[in-house]
Amino acid sequence: MISDSITNASASAAPSARDMGKKKRQTNRAAKLKQSKLGLRREQWLSQVAMINKGDKEETCPNRKTGNGKTVLPVENLEVQRGGEEEAHHHESFISNSPNSILNSIPDFSSGSSSGSGGSCSGNITEEEEEDAAADDDDNDDGCLDDWEAFADALAADEEKKHEKVNPPPEEHESVIKQSASLRDSSDVKPVRKQKSNQAWRADDKLRPQGLPNLGKQRSFPVMNMHFSSVAVPSSCPICYEDLDLTDSSFLPCPCGFRLCLFCHKTICDGDGRCPGCRKPYEKNTVKVETSVHPGGLTIRLARSSSMFCRS
Amino acid sequence: MIDISRVQKELQDCEKDRDSSGIRVCPKSDNLTRLTGTIPGPIGTPYEGGTFQIDITIPEGYPFEPPKMQFSTKVWHPNISSQSGAICLDVLKDQWSPALTLKTALVSVQALLSAPEPKDPQDAVVAEQYMKNYQVFVSTARYWTQTFAKNSSLEDKVKRLVEMGFGDAQVRSAIESSGGDENLALEKLCSG
C-alpha cells in the first residue's frame, strides 16, 4: 500500500506534458463519470426497494402486454445501458488512487451479496492497479477497461443471484418479454430502469454482445425470426430446381449463404464436396441449421473470459 | 439418370431472354442429352458479326458434372481447337459448379472469345500467332468468322459458287445436299 503511493507520487513528480494532459482529461472525465455513477447507484438502490415492493405486480403485469412488434428496441436499450454501466466502472479506476478505495466501494455497490465471484474479481483488480501504478504506461486505459468489464460481469452474476432471491421463478425468455413490455410501461420510471439494467447484465452474462440481439429476437418472437431468415431463401433449389421444403429452407450448409436442398447437398458431399456458391469445400459436420448461432456466441465469450484470466 | 426436369427448365429460361442475350439452346435429340447452343460473336472482337454453334452433350451426372461443349463452327482462337472445336475453359472442367447453367456456361464461352488466354492454349499454333503476331491473328480470326460463322442467305451462297464457274442448278443441288454448308457444297462440286 505504502509502496503503491510512493510509486504514484514518483510518477506524478516527474510529469511530462503528455502526462499532464492525460491527467487533466482523466480528471474531467472522472468528474463527469462520477456524476453518472452516483446517479446510477442511487437508482439501483431505489429500484431495489421498489422491486421488493412491486415484485408481484411486475411479474404478472407485463405478460399481458406481449406480442407487439417491438423487438429491436429493447435490445438497443440494453446495449446502451450496459455501455453506461461499463463507463461508470471504468471511471472508478481513475478516481481511486489506492486499491483500498476500490475494495471499499465494492461491498457498497453490491451490498449483502455473496462475495464469491465479486471477491475474486476485486483481487484481480487490485493486482491490475498495482501493475498500472508501477508501470504507468499507455496501456493503462485498455487494461482497466478489460478488467472492469470482467468486474461488471462478476457483479452481474451477483445481481442475478439477488434477482432470483427476490423473484423466485424468473425464466429467461419470460424476462426478455417482461423487459420489452416494461419499456412501454411509462407509469413508473424507477422500476423500469431497474428492470432494464438488470436485464442487460443478465442477458450479457448468458451471452456476449454478439449473440445478444439474436437471442432476444428468437426467444421472444420466433415468428418474426422465421420471417427474417426467409428473406434470402429462394423458393426452389438452384441445383435441381425443385421447391424447397421447410427443412431445406432452414438448411444453411456454407457460411457463404448458398442454399440448396438436402438431396443435392448429399450428392455434392458424395462427390467433390464443394459448395456450388463459392466453390470452397464444405467443412465436415457443418450440417447446421440456421438457429444454431449460439455456439459461436459462446465460443467468443469463452475466449474473452480466458483472456481475462491470462491477464491476472 | 439425367435430370430431365432441370434441363427442360433451363431451356425455358434461356428461351425467355433469348432476344436480350442472343444466346439460344435448342435440343438436338428428344431425350435432351444432345443440344445445340448458339452464341453471337462479341462486339469489338474479330468474332463480331459471327454466329457460333456449340455442340452440347449432357452427361449422366449433370448438373453435378459439367456439360460437354465443343464448337461445331470453326473458330480461330488460342483456347479453341481450330481442328476439333474443343474448348479450354476452366468452368467447363474443374471449376464447374452445379449452380451454373447451360446459359451461364455459354456466356462464359462468349466471354472467352473476347478475352483469349494464350498462356493456357488449346491450339498452340493460334496461341503462338496471337503472341508473336497479333495483327495477323486478328485478320485470320476475322476471316474465319466471315467464312464459317456468317450464316449468309442461300442466294449469296449460290452467287459466290456460281462466280467460281459452276452451273446454277448444280450449285443449288450441291448446297441442298450438303445441308446449306457452303464449303461442303464446294467440296462436292469440286470432287463431283
Image (spheres, rainbow, N blue to C red):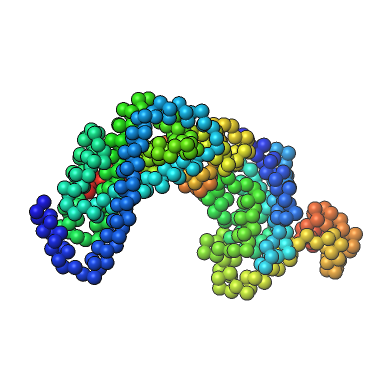
Q: Quadrant of residue A157?
A: top left
Q: Nearer the viewer, residue A286 or A98?
A: A98
The vertical placement of B130 against A123, above or below, is below
Residue furthest left as drawn: A2
For the C terminus of chain B, which image quadrant? bottom right
At a point 56% along the width and 68% down the height, the residue shown is B128
At a point 63% along the width and 61% down the height, the residue shown is B113
The vertical placement of B90 against A53, above or below, is below
Residue B53 position within the rendered picture, expressed as x and y whole percent measured from the top left: 70, 54
Residue furthest right as drawn: B169
At a point 21% along the width and 35% down the height, the residue shown is A115
Q: Nearer the viewer, residue A84 or A235?
A: A84
Image-based side of A48 in relation to B26, left or right: left
Q: Can you see residue B83?
A: no
Residue A67 position within the rendered picture, expressed as x and y whole percent measured from the top left: 54, 32
Residue A166 position within the rendered picture, expressed as x and y whole percent measured from the top left: 33, 28
The vertical placement of B9 against A66, above or below, is below
For the N terminus of chain B, which image quadrant? top right
At a point 59% along the width and 66% down the height, the residue shown is B126
Q: Nearer the viewer, residue B21 or A170?
A: A170
Total numbered labels: 0
Q: Can you see residue A5?
A: yes
Residue A26 position within the rendered picture, expressed as x and y whole percent measured from the top left: 27, 60
Image-based side of B45 in relation to A164, left or right: right
